[in-house]
Image: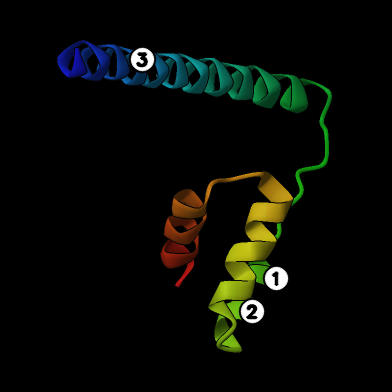
Amino acid sequence: MEYIFIMLLLVGILSLINFVNTLRKQVSYMNLKLDKIAKQVEAEELNIDSELRTLISEGKKVEAVKKLREFTGMGLKEAKEYIDKLL
């Protein structure tokens, strides 16, 4: 009985992982489309890298990560990696 529950739980987890990966691919595709559209209409690109670099130079790396996450909607891991690349 316990093994059946564990198997069902594992199947559920694997299904969720597959679903999340599918969503990530779709979001990536939509971002590519949006970038193309933005270039065609010559939309102004918002860039906060200089503000982030200022926060980093002031020793406010955590604040820089928070600011980036608020601005872009990035996850914590991605935002931390982005900030580390700015250094």
Q: CA distance from mark 3 to mark 1?
A: 42 Å
**Disc 1 residue type (three-letter):** Glu
Residue at image coords 31%, 19%? 9
Residue ID at (34%, 21%): 13
**Residue for badge 2:** 55
**Depth-wise, is mark 2 or mark 3 nearer the camera?**
3
Q: Are marks 2 and 1 in contact (CB under 8 Å)?
A: yes
Say which label, 3 or 1, has the lower sequence index: 3
Is residue 71 or residue 12 the one in the foreground?
A: 12
**Marker disc for residue 6:** none
Kind of residue indicated by mark 2: Leu
Q: Residues within 10 Å of mark 3 (few under 14, many from 20)?
A: few
* Residue 6, position as x, y percentages in the image: 23, 20
Residue placed farthest to the bottom in the image?
58
How many other residues sit within 10 Å of disc 2, few (<14), some (14-19) or many (≥20)?
Answer: some
**What residue did someone put label 1 on?**
51
* Residue under label 3: 12
Above or below, comparing residue 85 to residue 61 in the picture: above
- Residue appearing at x 21%, y 13% in the figure: 7
**Sequence-first tag of 2 and 3:** 3
What kind of residue is marked 3? Gly
Q: Are marks 2 and 3 in contact (CB under 8 Å)?
A: no
Q: Position of residue 56 (x, y in %)?
A: 56, 79
Residue 51 location, quadrant: bottom right
